[in-house]
Image: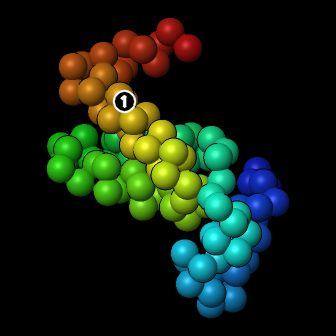
């Protein structure tokens, strides 16, 4: 499990051991995590749901809640996915990738 933080590792281990997803996240991050992990996972959500704006928010929240279930973390993930989706829809995605 290289590349993931200790808290995320704990959540995933609990899920692997059969603990409910939400219960696992709450037990490791009481009150919710404010980290940026779910925002970093927003780009694939934007790509997967580029033609499905009606469920983009639901998908962004769902991927966030695995490790970052605080409402601000979920909303941040959604806003990032929405911004990326907007750039793709306007044809600006590939252009911006070349500037990095």
Q: Could you say which quadrant of the image residue 5 lies in?
A: bottom right
Q: Is residue 41 visible?
A: no
Q: Is residue 66 left or right of residue 46?
A: right
Q: How is the image coloured?
A: rainbow
Q: Could you say which quadrant of the image residue 43 lies in?
A: top left
Provide residue 59's location: percent of width, then percent of height: 35, 56
Q: Nearer the viewer, residue 79 or 100?
A: 79
Position of 17 relative to 42 (above/below): below
Q: Is residue 42 left or right of residue 59?
A: right
Q: Is residue 53 left or right of residue 76?
A: left
Position of 34 relative to 29 (above/below): above
For numbered disc 1, what is the local secondary structure? helix
Provide residue 63's location: percent of width, then percent of height: 47, 58
Question: Where does label 1 land, which residue?
Answer: 84
In the picture, the quarter occupied by the N terminus is bottom right
Q: Nearer the viewer, residue 64 or 75?
A: 75
Provide residue 37's location: percent of width, then percent of height: 62, 46
Residue at 55% over, 77% down: 21
Position of 81 relative to 15 (above/below): above
Provide residue 13's location: percent of width, then percent of height: 73, 77
Crowding at mark 1 (Cα within 10 Å: few <14, some 14-19, many 20+):
many
């Amino acid at each position: 499990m290289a590349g993931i933080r200790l808290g995320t590792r704990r959540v995933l281990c609990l899920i692997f051991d059969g603990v409910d997803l939400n219960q696992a996240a709450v037990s490791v991050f009481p009150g919710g995590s404010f980290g940026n992990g779910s925002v970093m996972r927003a780009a694939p959500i934007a790509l997967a749901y580029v033609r499905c704006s009606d469920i983009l928010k639901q998908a962004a929240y769902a991927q966030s809640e695995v490790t970052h279930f605080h409402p601000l973390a979920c909303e941040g993930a959604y806003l990032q996915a929405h911004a990326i989706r907007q750039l793709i829809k306007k044809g600006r995605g590939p252009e911006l990738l070349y500037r990095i």
